[in-house]
Each structure stands twice: as structure tokens, then as C-alpha cells.
Amino acid sequence: MSTLDDRKSIRKYLETDVDDILLRQLLRTAEQTQTMGNLQLYSVVVTRDREMKTKLAPFHFNQSMVIDAPVVLTFCADYNRTTLWCENRHAKPGYNNFLSFMNAATDTLLYCQSFCNLAEEAGLGLCYLGTTVYNSQAIIDLLQLPQLVMPVATITLGWPAENPPVSDRLPLDSVIHNERYNDYSSALIDRFYEKKESLPENKKFVEINSKETLAQVFTDIRYTKKDCEEMSVGLLAALKNQGFL
Amino acid sequence: MSTLDDRKSIRKYLETDVDDILLRQLLRTAEQTQTMGNLQLYSVVVTRDREMKTKLAPFHFNQSMVIDAPVVLTFCADYNRTTLWCENRHAKPGYNNFLSFMNAATDTLLYCQSFCNLAEEAGLGLCYLGTTVYNSQAIIDLLQLPQLVMPVATITLGWPAENPPVSDRLPLDSVIHNERYNDYSSALIDRFYEKKESLPENKKFVEINSKETLAQVFTDIRYTKKDCEEMSVGLLAALKNQGFL
């Protein structure tokens, strides 16, 4: 885990494949992560086929690593398997609801992060694609996910062919609260974001986007209100289609 | 990370405190986990005060470790800090929607799991409380979480005073799918759940609950349809109160 100190997302990979024995070993060890009632409410779809990667890419905004990475993993919240088990055992499941989605999504994301930590410790590089929840329905259709299965995370994985700098983080005091939530005054916001805003790469980011502040790059370009609202509609519709709402 | 091979949830702790320097170091290192747009959409409320732990306990079904653990950590999806930053920088945030909740919850759970892996590697023991999403509103009120902050995970933490057996996991083949989701036949369900159902502790679990099958222990006692549906209503109401729906 000392690898976490200088971890970085890797978007460029060597052509060397990721051995299936290694991949299975990492996915197996990650299974020891805590899971609700020991039910393991997740599934992982492993994509190695180039044609499938080419079909997945547009749902991840055509980020090149989806096609270039030897392996793409789609982590899915899965109450289907548990439900089938119940139905086969004279037990009446009741997991087609929002709480159950949250439980399964939680199991899945914890499992996913343990896998990421293990993979990086093994020297692999990866990039987490937040786009999975932006285009859920398209991914559901392509990967043929049945009811009560919902994609929540995608990882591109391979042997690193780049070594980008470690990215900045907020001071720890900005994310921890003692006993109760201490809301942020303007002065505190200034203090906690000062370093981030003063970094040359972030200043350049503001400049090339012709914005006044770094925050505007996020609100006006990267994560706009319009996009978030439209994608919320799509995400809720997909959850409904999959039987979780 | 070799600790993951034989990890176990720890519910009994020594009276020895968890040093604040160590705790901060672990929470700090976990910050290197990937995060959406490098925004770190999470906060952690640290509970050490006995009175606060006593107040938290009922919201976690009075599980004794909430009071007995030296530290309780409530991990919260947090778009409040980012929103305040935007508002202070002439940027118009649009994160009061469901997609933004999922993005923040994802960031939070990945951060939480990196923290868990680091803490266990440091020899600490912990138990993940799934109850956080069952009683969200009560936790929100007690910890005074503002709009756009939602508790998604709770960890009790301390030095282990027990050494329980490693719990069983499903065979890896039951959770991975190649290229597309391969739905489960009855025969596959039988094969994948055979080991779990044959374990002496699980057979005993069925017997003491006077059930016919292990699955019925889950559907009739631990996670009933009625409870899941009622708690879904509460969870959605809390999300709405916090401004995410």
C-alpha cells in the first residue's frame, strides 16, 4: 500500500497483455473485502475483445484508453445472482428497491477499490472512468445486464507506459470534521483551496479555457448543471429499468 | 495488502486508543485514491466522544462496537464544500441532483475502502456498518450535516481484541463474466452456493433460526422485503432533504 503515496491514474499502457492468472488472482484476493451479510452483491464484466472495447468506447466519451488498454473491467452492482439463489431455495427475495441498489453499489465500489489497490501494488496502472453512470443504459444494453444489475464503475487496466506527476490533494483538515460537521466559512474555503488554485497546471487550465477562476472550469465546462441534470434523468431511468426504483 | 488475504471484520477492541497522528496519517494517505475531477467529494466525521457514540449507537441498531470502539468514522458524500468553493469563485454550481450524489457517493466509498486497506495493513481492526443508509436522516441530524452532504458509510475502528475466522467467499467464477453477462442457470446457482451452504456455521445459522434454507435466513430475517422497502422510502426522503433529489 506504500504505492498509494505516489499513485497516479495511468491512461497509456504497454502492448504487453495482462496475464489472466494474475488478473484472476487480484480479483480473487479483492473478494476478501467486507461485504453486506457476506452476500457479495457485485459482478465484474471483463472486456478484452477489441470489438467489444470499440463498442464500449463511445459510452465513455471515446477516451482512447478504453480501446488501448488490454483489459477493461465494468464493476456492476448485482442483486440478480442473490435473487436467483433465493428463488431457487424457497426464499422470497425483496431486493427490487432503492435501498438494495445502494447496498449493492456500496459492496461493488468497496470491492472495486480493493482491486485497484491490489492491482497498483502489483505494478499495474489503471484509470477509473466516472463516465459509467453517465451512460448506464447503453452499457447495460451492450453488456446484456439483466434486471437488478447496474454498472457503477469502469476501470481500464494495463502495464504503465507513462509516469505522470502525482496530482494535488486538498489539505486533510478540509475533509475531516471532529464530532460534528463544521461548515466552511469563506476564509476556510480560501485557505483550503489556495494551494490547488496556485498550482501552475491549474492556472494554465484556467487560462486555456478562458475562464476567470478554476471553479468556473468545473461549473462551465467539465461538470455543468445542464449535463448533471440531464444525466440524472438518464441514470434514474436506467435504475428504474433495472428494477431498482 | 497481503493482509487482505486473511482479513476479518473486528468487532471487539482493546481499550488502547488510536493515536490521532496515526489516524490522520492513514486518512491523509487515503486521499491519494482516485477522485472525480480531483474534487474529493467527501468528508469524514470523526467520533471519539463517548456521549456522541452513545447517541450514534441506536442509529446503528445498538451494535455494541459503536460505543466500545475508540473511534467511529462516518464517511459522507459531500458536494457542499465544492459548491461553496464555486459560489465563492463566481462559478455557478449545479450539483443538487442525483447524478452528483452518485458521483460523490462513489468518491466517498473508494476513499473509505482505501482507508480500510491502509488501516488493516497498520494492524488496526475495523467493522463496516451497513446501517448508515438505513437511518440516514437521524445521522444527518446528529452530525449536523448540511445540504449536499449525505452519510454513506460508517467504520468502527480500534486495535483488535479478537481473532475471528476468515469468512467464506463465493468462487471467483460466480462474480466474473467474460465480455458479456452470463446469466445463472439453476445448475450454476447450485454449484456456486454449494460450499457456502455446506459450511457448519451456516448450517447452524439455518437451524437456530428454524429455517429450511440459508437463503430464507436472509429473506425472512436479515434483509426482509418489508424492511428494504420501508428503508428505501426513508433513504430517498433523506436524499431529497439533503438536496440531491
Image: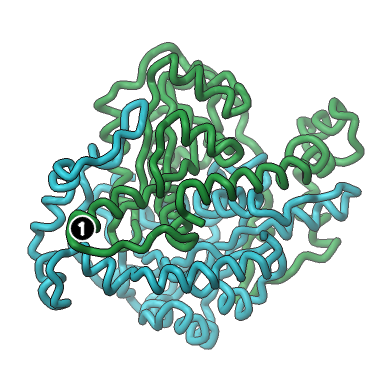
Chain colours: A green, B cyan
- Percent across and percent down for residue B97 are 69, 54
- Percent across and percent down for residue A166 are 60, 34
Q: Judging from the image, what secondary structure is the residue with disc 1 in?
A: loop
Q: Quadrant of residue A181?
A: bottom right
Nearer the observer, A26 or A241: A241
Q: Amino acid at mark 1?
A: Val
- Percent across and percent down for residue B237 are 61, 70
Is A16 rendered above or below residue B12? above
The reply, left or right, for residue B98 in relation to residue B130 is right
Q: Is residue B40 visible?
A: no
Q: Residue at x 80, y 48 (%)?
A: A194
- Percent across and percent down for residue A221 are 79, 35
Q: Residue at x 85, y 29 (%)?
A: A209
- Chain of the residue on which disc 1 is drawn: B
The quadrant of the image that shows the N terminus of chain A is top left
Nearer the observer, B62 or A147: A147
How many marks on residues? 1
Q: Is residue B42 visible?
A: yes
Q: Residue at x 62, y 29 (%)?
A: A165
Is B94 rendered above or below residue A23? below
Q: Quadrant of residue A96?
A: bottom left
Q: Residues within 10 Å of mark 1 (few under 14, many from 20)?
A: few
Is A70 rendered above or below residue A186? above
The reply, left or right, for residue B130 in relation to residue A23 is right
Nearer the observer, B132 or B118: B132
Q: Which residue is mark 1?
A: B166
Q: Residue at x 86, y 54 (%)?
A: B87
The reply, left or right, for residue B94 in relation to residue A164 is right
